[in-house]
């Protein structure tokens, strides 16, 4: 039997009840519950985002309305979203204004060890094309400025042109990329969070003088949360700062033997750059600053992603679960880093050779389907690999389940669902092709089985909640 036929049969026939072998593998039934009266965070409509290297602007033809294939794929992720420009290359990319420089490459990927630092530039032509791309997609831009090698005056000149050209498509300006790793790289060994805040203030003063009315985001840190704490503590002095930002990588580097599929399933991998304890620090920074928090760059495995881990079907379930977990915590968005042929990129390709979707693209679409929904309080789930989320969307209660494990999980839903169910699935965790996201019809039953490395989205039948 073909995998697609199996998935559709499993859905239509009522899950594990039609397949005793799967029911046995699933073990006991996990009973789910939620409180429809206790609400939490609401997922913003522009929650979905992508992150690219700022150096990509060296080729003005990439972010352009004429790049219709990329426009279509971005719109396919969400009608609203944000393109974040920054990355390690951002600190080596100079602003050249109206100067016209022939691009030396078509794409610039995210791999640190392949970083091309020659001829990286941003021109007004690239900015005008970027504006056309944003207009064509309906997305906005979180724009990163060079802090490591630019002066405040140079950054101010660029910011003024960015404000003028991007106009209402400009979400906010970020000054610098991962300032917490500047020490011993771009700044002396004595560089501290206080030094960063003081330098950020000098850049901010020059930029606001040249471009009044700009909005700012920051600090866009790598993993040293004391820089987030310091920035949050100073943020109330700047009414134009509209959000806190930071980066997240589940594990890395890509060359580490401990960066595996099994590790990716865990809440905290051995090589995680963001530890579980960091959630409390982020929450405290939000409270102190009074600002929302956005994950402005991140993915499964830093250094461009790992072959066989970041580019396979398991990454789709991982991405869907991470999005919903962060949204439930009140984070306002996620910008998956990528570009070029990066192993973890949701979209890969070039304007000349075409573009294609990686599995993470479909996991992102799954999360996007719940944009505008409000979380409802759920009961605890004993299975460590099962993500369980209850939400209210357009007056309907919905249940999202993400199984990152290698075995199916049988659950009893809180109420009878309707027949249509959304399924994110694939032939195996390590499959690089055939990840699918589809709506199928199944016989309504409260007892359902979630296949391995899959996600399912149910809408509860009206009046079925006991």
Image (cartoon, rainbow, N blue to C red):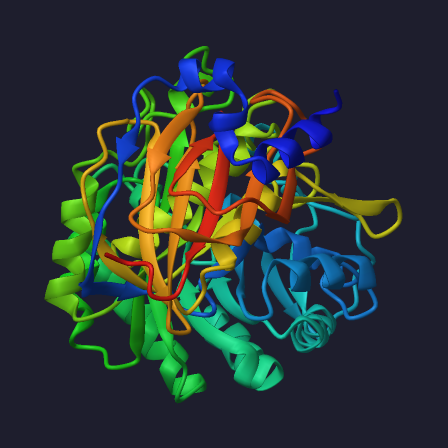
Is residue 245 visible to us here?
no
Determine the residue located farthest toward the right in the rendered image: 352
Is residue 155 visible to us here?
yes
Q: Look at 20% across and 41% down and name the residue there.
A: 278
Q: Is the residue 346 above or below the residue 230 in the image?
A: above
Residue 438, position in %: x, y? 64, 47
Q: Quadrant of the C terminus?
A: bottom left
- Using the image as rendered, state which of residue 407 and residue 126 is in the foreground: 407
Q: Look at 30% across and 27% down and name the residue there.
A: 29
- Using the image as rendered, state which of residue 145 and residue 37 is in the foreground: 37
Q: Is the residue 39 above or below the residue 421 in the image?
A: below
Quarter where residue 330 is shown: bottom left
Q: Is residue 109 left or right of residue 465?
A: right
Residue 107, position in %: x, y? 74, 46
- Using the image as rendered, state which of residue 358 and residue 55 is in the foreground: 358
Q: Look at 50% across and 66% down and name the residue there.
A: 143
Residue 460, position in %: x, y? 40, 57
- Using the image as rendered, state which of residue 377 and residue 187 is in the foreground: 377
Q: Is the residue 323 above or below the residue 198 in the image?
A: above
Q: Is residue 297 left or right of residue 267?
A: right
Q: Look at 62% across and 45% down and name the residue there.
A: 437
Residue 124, position in %: x, y? 69, 74
Q: Quadrant of the N terminus?
A: top right
Determine the residue located farthest toward the bottom in the rendered image: 212
């Amino acid at each position: 039997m073909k995998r697609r036929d199996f998935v559709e049969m499993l859905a239509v026939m009522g899950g594990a009840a039609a397949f005793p072998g799967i029911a046995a593998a699933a073990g006991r039934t996990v009973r789910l519950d939620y409180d429809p009266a206790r609400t939490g965070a609401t997922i913003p409509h522009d929650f979905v985002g992508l992150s690219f290297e700022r150096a990509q602007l060296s080729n003005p033809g990439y972010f352009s309305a004429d790049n219709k294939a990329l426009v279509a794929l971005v719109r396919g992720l969400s009608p609203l979203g944000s393109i974040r420009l920054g990355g390690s290359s951002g600190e080596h990319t100079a602003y050249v204004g109206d100067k016209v420089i022939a691009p030396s490459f078509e794409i610039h990927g995210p791999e640190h060890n392949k970083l091309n630092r020659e001829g990286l530039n941003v021109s007004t032509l690239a900015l005008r094309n970027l504006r056309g791309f944003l207009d064509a997609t309906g997305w906005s831009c979180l724009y990163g400025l060079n802090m490591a090698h630019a002066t405040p005056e140079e950054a101010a000149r660029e910011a003024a042109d960015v404000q003028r050209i991007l106009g209402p498509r400009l979400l906010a300006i970020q000054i610098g990329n991962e300032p917490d790793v500047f020490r011993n790289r771009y700044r002396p060994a004595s560089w501290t969070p206080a030094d960063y805040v003081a330098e950020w203030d000098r850049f901010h003063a020059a930029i606001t003088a040249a471009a009044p009315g700009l909005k700012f985001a920051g600090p866009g840190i790598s993993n040293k949360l004391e820089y987030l704490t310091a920035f949050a503590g100073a943020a109330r002095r700047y009414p134009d700062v509209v959000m806190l930002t930071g980066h997240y990588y589940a594990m890395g580097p890509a060359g580490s033997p401990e960066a595996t599929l099994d590790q990716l399933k865990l809440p905290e991998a051995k090589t995680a750059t963001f530890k579980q304890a960091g959630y409390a620090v982020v929450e405290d920074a939000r409270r102190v600053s009074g600002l929302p928090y956005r994950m402005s760059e991140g993915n499964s495995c830093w250094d461009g992603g790992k072959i066989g881990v970041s580019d396979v079907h398991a990454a789709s379930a991982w991405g869907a679960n991470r999005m919903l977990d962060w949204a439930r915590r009140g984070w306002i968005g996620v910008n998956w880093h990528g570009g070029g042929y990066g192993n973890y990129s949701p979209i890969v390709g070039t304007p000349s050779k075409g573009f294609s979707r990686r599995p993470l693209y479909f996991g992102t679409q799954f999360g996007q389907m719940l944009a505008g929904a409000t979380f409802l309080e759920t009961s605890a789930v004993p299975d460590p690999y099962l993500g369980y989320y209850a939400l209210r969307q357009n007056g309907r209660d919905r249940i999202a389940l993400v199984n990152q494990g290698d075995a199916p999980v049988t659950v009893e839903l809180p109420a009878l669902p309707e027949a249509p169910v959304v399924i994110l699935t694939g032939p195996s965790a390590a499959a690089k092709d055939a990840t699918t996201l589809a709506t199928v019809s199944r016989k309504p039953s409260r007892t359902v089985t979630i296949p391995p490395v899959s996600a399912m989205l149910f809408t509860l039948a009206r009046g079925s909640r006991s």
